[in-house]
Image (cartoon, grey):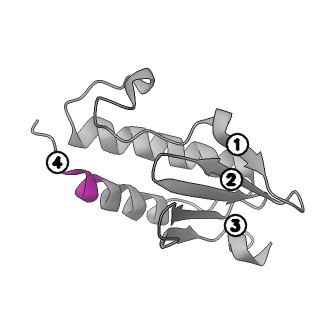
Amino acid sequence: MAKRPKPERLAEFCRRVQAGNAAAMFEEAYDLLCRTMDAVEDELTDIPNRPAHWKSDGPMYPPQRDSLTTLPGGRVMRLRSLRHYTFIGDNGAIEIVGASDGKILLSKRGRDGRRVGDL
């Protein structure tokens, strides 16, 4: 399969996360992000999944737990990626924001209907 451009893969990732079931807690939301990212990359690229080579091989990888920070108040966790911050609420809400421009790429409510900014 020919590799699809990263912007197309990112848009597909966001579409699938939005279409997925709302999460009720951090672990469910993080799992949704990771499973969806891996599925999109497996389907739309021919590059093997080798997270240790994230700087050089080109696919997108889910945010890693070693970049996890709990924000003040303890209700929202932040994960840092190369170009994005991923915020996940203890209610399962998800928000992905551009690291350089602050633009919201994805905002998904938790199962309780609240967004990350509501926590």
Give the residue at x 51% y 41%: 34
Marks 3 and 4, how far apart at CA:
32 Å
Query: Which of pointers 2 and 4 lies earlier in the amino acid sequence?
Result: 4
Q: Residue under circle 2?
A: 78
Q: Which mark is residue 111?
A: 3
Marks 2 and 3, how far apart at CA:
19 Å
Q: CB atoms at circles 1 and 2 under 8 Å apart?
A: yes
Give the residue at x 32% y 62%: 11
Q: Is residue 67 left or right of residue 1?
A: right
Q: Residue under circle 4?
A: 4
Q: Give the camera-side residue of 57 and 16.
A: 57
Q: Give the camera-side residue of 106 and 99.
A: 99
As helix, strand or loop, the secondary structure at mark 4 comes to loop
Q: CB atoms at circles 1 and 4 under 8 Å apart?
A: no
Residue type, mark 3 in image: Arg
**Few, some or many C-alpha atoms within 10 Å of disc 1 (few <14, some 14-19, many ≥20)?**
some
Q: Is residue 106 left or right of residue 26?
A: left
Q: Residue under circle 1?
A: 68
Q: Which residues are magenta?
A: 4-9
In the rendered image, residue 72, in percent from the top left (x then y), is placed at 86, 60
Query: Which of pointers 3 and 4 lies earlier in the amino acid sequence?
Result: 4
Query: Which of pointers 3 and 1 lies earlier in the amino acid sequence?
Result: 1
Query: Which of pointers 1 and 2 lies earlier in the amino acid sequence?
Result: 1
In the rendered image, residue 95, in percent from the top left (x then y), is placed at 59, 65
Give the residue at x 72% y 50%: 26
Name of the residue lying farthest toward the left:
2
